[in-house]
Image: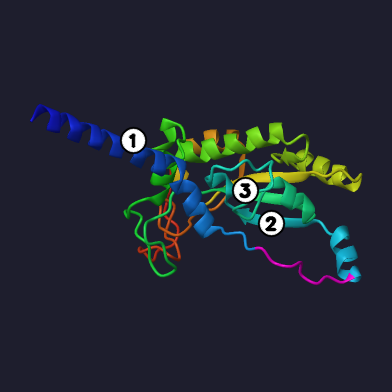
């Protein structure tokens, strides 16, 4: 009997270890690959006139979520759509990197409850984000800003985070000189990382965020979302 119990205990422990390896090592990458697949295709036809015009433009993308995933954005990725090499290749001058901090289970365009299970909690745990992010939307926003700062430091000058008008001017001047540099602007996707307290705006701003959406796919303390359930406008939000 003791041998059987010992054998069953070992089997359970092995199953737990295998499950942990799969969850932490493969599931997040699988989820991102399924949601942000890269499909190989022949180059799209592009006339010389269009290509020449594109080179003269200041191209900006106002929304992308790659900071949500465990990828090195200084390297060309095999999954996902945005990284520094591809932004440079596409002549993108400005990229807004939005921090996703909450995503209700079953998210849709009709109605989403703010009380629904939050998928980002699982991603934070599965990708081994710091413990402070597991139960704090504010810390998730700050952590994603920290990630972009690390990518900036490792980018060999190809990524510059823009926090001021002077930063923006410097990036545009560098590009005018022919330097391959992308200006990164941090933002939060919905103001729920404030966690109902206006005082939390300061640490989020200090982390580098400069674009602040009020709502996203669900209602928060600042008001109702088009895709939420309250069907209301802005609230009389104040610090608490």
Q: Within the image, what quadrant is residue 226 found in?
A: bottom left
Q: Which mark is residue 114?
A: none
Which image quarter holds the N terminus? top left
Q: Is residue 101 visible?
A: no
Specify the segment rendered in magenta: 40-47
Please tell me the numbered disc located at residue 97.
3
Inter-mark Cα distance, 2 to 1: 42 Å
Image point (54%, 42%), residue name: 70
**Sequence-wise, which precedes: disc 2 or disc 1?**
1
Give the Cα separation between the discs numbered 1 and 3. 35 Å
User: Do the residues under discs 3 and 2 have CB atoms within 8 angstroms?
Assistant: no
Q: Nearer the viewer, residue 224 or 61?
A: 61
Q: Nearer the viewer, residue 142 or 12?
A: 12
Using the image, tell me which numbered label, if any, was put on residue 61.
Answer: 2
Q: CA distance from mark 3 to mark 2?
A: 9 Å
Q: Nearer the viewer, residue 107 or 171?
A: 107
Indicate which disc, 1 or 3, sits on the residue closer to the N terminus.
Answer: 1
Q: Which residue lies at the image location 45% right of the left edge and 60% below the top edge?
A: 217
Q: Are marks 1 and 3 in contact (CB under 8 Å)?
A: no
Residue receiving disc 1: 17
Corner quadrant of residue 108: bottom left
Residue 174: % across, % down: 86, 42
Residue 59 colored in magenta in the image? no
* Count of marks placed on residues: 3
- The answer to whether residue 80 shows anywhere in this view is yes
Query: Is 208 drawn above or below residue 69 in the view shown?
Result: above
């Amino acid at each position: 009997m003791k041998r059987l119990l010992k054998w069953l205990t070992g089997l359970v422990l092995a199953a737990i270890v295998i499950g942990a390896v799969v969850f932490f090592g493969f599931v997040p990458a699988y989820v991102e690959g399924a949601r942000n697949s890269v499909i190989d295709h022949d180059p799209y036809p592009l006339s010389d006139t269009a290509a020449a015009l594109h080179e003269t433009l200041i191209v900006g993308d106002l929304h992308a979520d790659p900071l949500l995933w465990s990828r090195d954005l200084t390297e060309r990725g095999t999954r996902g759509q945005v990284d520094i090499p591809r932004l440079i290749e596409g002549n993108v001058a400005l990229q807004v990197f939005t921090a996703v901090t909450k995503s209700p289970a079953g998210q849709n365009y009709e109605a989403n409850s703010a009380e629904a299970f939050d998928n980002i909690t699982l991603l934070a745990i599965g990708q081994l984000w710091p413990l402070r992010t597991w139960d704090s939307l504010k810390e998730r926003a700050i952590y994603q800003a920290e990630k972009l700062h690390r990518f900036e430091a490792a980018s060999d000058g190809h990524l510059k985070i823009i926090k001021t008008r002077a930063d923006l001017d410097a990036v545009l001047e560098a590009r005018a000189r022919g330097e391959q540099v992308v200006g990164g602007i941090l933002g939060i996707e919905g103001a729920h990382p404030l966690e109902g307290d206006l005082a939390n705006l300061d640490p989020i701003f200090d982390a580098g965020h400069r674009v602040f959406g009020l709502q996203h796919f669900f209602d928060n303390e600042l008001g109702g979302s088009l895709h939420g359930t309250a069907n209301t406008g802005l609230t009389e939000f104040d610090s608490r």
